[in-house]
Image: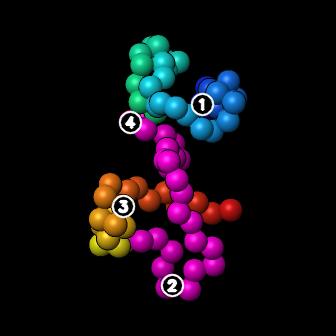
Amino acid sequence: MAWLDDLVRRNGGVSFGHLDVPVPCCRAVVKLDSLRYEEPIGFAWFEISATNPTRAKYELDAEELAVVAGLLGHPVTQILAHY
């Protein structure tokens, strides 16, 4: 993942105008969000986060994600992060 860290540094931060980049293994141009990473990672225009939720479980289930996607009018992906 060092190449991704280098890409972020060269880009001047974590904001990308597009996700098409050459990968180091074969220099093929692929979309960053189509690659499989060791840890979950996401590329988004915005982030929704909750701290200290009072629910019994941390993650949203498939039905809840479908409601969020419906409200936004776009598919969503849940990336769980613990800080």
Let me know if residue 26 appears in the view: yes
Q: Earlier in the sequence, mark 3 or mark 4?
A: 4
Tell me what residue is drawn at x 60 percent, y 30 percent. Answer: 4
The quadrant holding residue 54 is bottom right
Q: Residue 13 location, x and y as percent?
A: 67, 35
Crowdedness of circle 2 by 10 Å Cα count: few (<14), some, many (20+)?
Answer: few
Q: Nearer the viewer, residue 9 or 80?
A: 9
Predominant SS along the magenta part: loop
Q: Which residues are magenta?
A: 33-60
C-alpha gap between disc 3 and disc 1: 29 Å
**Location of the N terminus (image quadrant):** top right
Quadrant assignment, res 73: bottom left
3D distance between C-alphas at marks 3 and 4: 21 Å
Identify the secondary structure beneath mark 3.
helix
Look at mark 4 in the image and give the residue it sits on: 34
Q: Position of residue 77 (x, y in %)?
A: 40, 55
Between the residue at mark 2 and the residue at mark 3, the CA separation in whole angstroms equals: 22 Å
